[in-house]
Structures are given as structure tokens and as C-alpha cells.
Amino acid sequence: MRSSILMTWIFVYALWGHAQFPQPDGGDLQPGTLPLSWNSGGPKCMEMPEWQIHEYNPNLFILRQSGCTDFEMPFLYLFFGKERGLLWDTGSRNGDLVPTLQHVVHEWLERNHRGSISLVVMHSHSHSDHTWGDKAVQGMNDPAIPIQFVAPTVEAAIKFFNIDSWPTGLGKVDLGGRVLNIVPVPGHDTYAVALYDRSTGIVLTGDNLYPGRLYISDFAAYQASTERLIAFLRGKPVSYILGNHIEETSTPFKDFPIGSIYHPQERRLELSFGDLLALDDGLKSMQGAPHRMAMSDFTIWPRQPKGQDDKLEQIFRETQEEQLRNKWDQPR
């Protein structure tokens, strides 16, 4: 195991060296910033907006849904190119995304002296905590923001992103001077994709990799997807890996109880390419016998047969009951 970890880090350093842009200008990746912390769901829900908006740079925005609306508190990503924009996911239950989405897009239009821009709406995968806002976004009826909706299905993704074979092929979408690569990554869900933004070096991994419990429905497919994503990224600059959730505290190996709407001392959102390699190493170490494995910043969590996760369901019910009862003033 020790030799395997050593080889992994040798590979990381080799990859970083190959991907490093030449000095003195550091290449042409568009820089941006991430916050030191995000709103979650408190301590006072009366003070929490439904969505937190963060400007990574003038053409990439990150939206996070408040835990006061739903414990999933997913992240959404909004990209802009010269010809159109792209929205990654539409949020979870009670999100009421449309007013916030319109606000961000109209502010971008005003800043860029534009009257309108079409918006591609796509999804990391098909689970309801990332698709709940679909109907409202499709019915937005804003002349300044015509929608191109891509349903969260394998068939729709193959057609729109021109993926020649699923899941081994690749797709892409050109927003006008900004190409986003699409990599199929089933395993958490039958339909799931990762996204690579050539402009910023950011990789979106949906629910396949984030600081939290990585639920795996099809272990073999998930492992193969992880290996394919690594192969795709080889030699490419990766600034950050960003997922759809944060479930980890700032203390290594410690997560928040499932169902938590408030995350004090939450871990930062961003992961690195090294974390992706560590995930791959953990999966391979199981040698085809899936089991839960806690790692520093996430837990590999193969799904159990129905009825065998009763303890998890009990924790969810108890956590929800306590935190929702105190949503107006969480215990310090």
C-alpha cells in the first residue's frame, strides 16, 4: 500500500510538471478566486438568503443554495462565453432559483453591454437535488435569456454534446471562445458527467467527487469513470476540482451528520487533482470488494442493499428534527 501511495504522488508531480505553464506570464488560464467559507444554513435562517452568489471571475459564477431551504445545499455553476452561457444544474427542493438566476444574468448583460444571451441548461446527473428547478427554469419566459435545455439523460447528452459512444466517448460545447469538455462518469448515477473548462482549468465532478460521502451505486462503473477522468486530464492544467456539495468539516476525516442544514467550520469546497488520484488509489485498494473507506477529505461510500442503511436513516431523521426545530437560532 505504501509503495502504491508513493507511485501515486510521483505521478502527481510528473503531471504537474508537464502541465505547468511557462514563465514568466504563467500561461493564459483565466484566474479567479474562491471564498474562504460559504454560507450553509445559519446560525439564523432569518438572515440567510436562499442563494449565495460568488463571482469566481467576470465570466464564471458559483451559486450555493441555503441549507435553510434544503439540507442538500448544492452548488450550481454559471459560465459565460461570447455567444452563450451554460448553467450546471438547477438546484434542490424549495430553491426558487429563477429570481437569482435572472439577477446574475441580467447584471452580466448590463456589464457587457448586451441585450440578451442564450443559456444552455445542463445537469451533472439526474438526481432530484440537482434537477428540482428544471420546470421553473424552462418556464422562465425571459426574452433576454432564451433557454436551450438538455435533459439529464444519456440520450440527450449524447445528442447535444455529440458524444460518439457512452460512456467511453467525449463531448464538448462551445460557448463562443470558451470550450467546455464533457466526460461521461456514470457510477453514482446511470447518467453522470464531469466538465472541464479550458478557460479556467476548473473541473466539475458533480456528486462523483466532493468533500463528503461519495455514494456509489455501480462500483465497477464508478471506478472505470474515475480512471477515464484521470486519463482525460493527463497533461492538462487543473486549477481546482469542484463538486456539488460539502459534507465535511474542517477537521480531517470528520463529516457533518446526514441531514444537517447548518455547517459551522465547514471544509472548503475545492479539491485538487491529487485528491482525484487518491480516490482512484482507494478504489483500487479494495480489489473489487467495495466497502466504506474514510479518507481525509471524503468517504468512499458504496450503496448498501435496501434496508441495510437503517442507522443512516435514523441519523438523518434525528438531525433534521433537531436542526429544523432550531433553524431560527442554531446552538453555538
Image: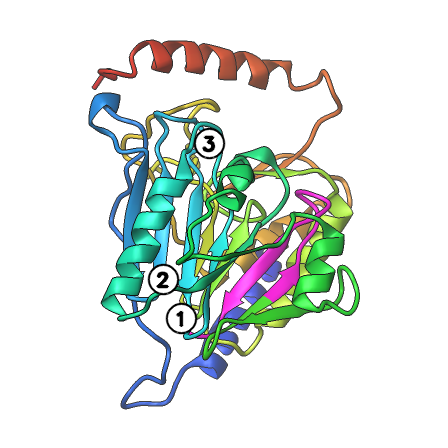
User: Which callout, 1 or 2, points to the residue nearer the camera?
Assistant: 2
Judge whether 242 appears above or below 261 on screen.
below
Question: Which amino acid, by three-letter code, is at mark 3?
Answer: Glu
Q: Is residue 71 left or right of residue 32?
A: right
Residue 283 in sight here: yes
At mark 2, the secondary structure is strand
Task: Determine contact: label 3, label 1, CB under 8 Å.
Answer: no
Residue at 23% in and 24% down: 43
Whole-Å distance between the Cαs marked 2 and 3? 22 Å
Mark positioned earlier in the residue sequence (3 or 1) = 3
Task: Determine contact: label 1, label 2, CB under 8 Å.
Answer: yes
User: In which image quadrant can residue 159 be found?
Assistant: bottom right
Instruction: Measuring from the top left, give residue 260's x and y in whole percent.
Output: 41, 23
Residue 5 in sight here: no
Q: Mark 3 = which residue?
A: 72
Judge whether 106 appears above or below 168 on screen.
above
The image's mark for residue 60 is 2
Q: Mark 1 = which residue?
A: 200
User: In which image quadrant can residue 155 be found?
Assistant: bottom right
Q: Toward the viewer: 142 or 252?
A: 142
Segment colored magenta: 182-200
User: In which image quadrant can residue 66 be found?
Assistant: top left
The image's mark for residue 281 is none
Whole-Å distance between the Cαs marked 1 and 2? 9 Å
Residue at 36% in and 83% down: 28
Mark positioned earlier in the residue sequence (1 or 2) = 2
At mark 3, the secondary structure is loop
Q: Is residue 42 left or right of residue 63?
A: left
Q: Is residue 192 magenta?
A: yes
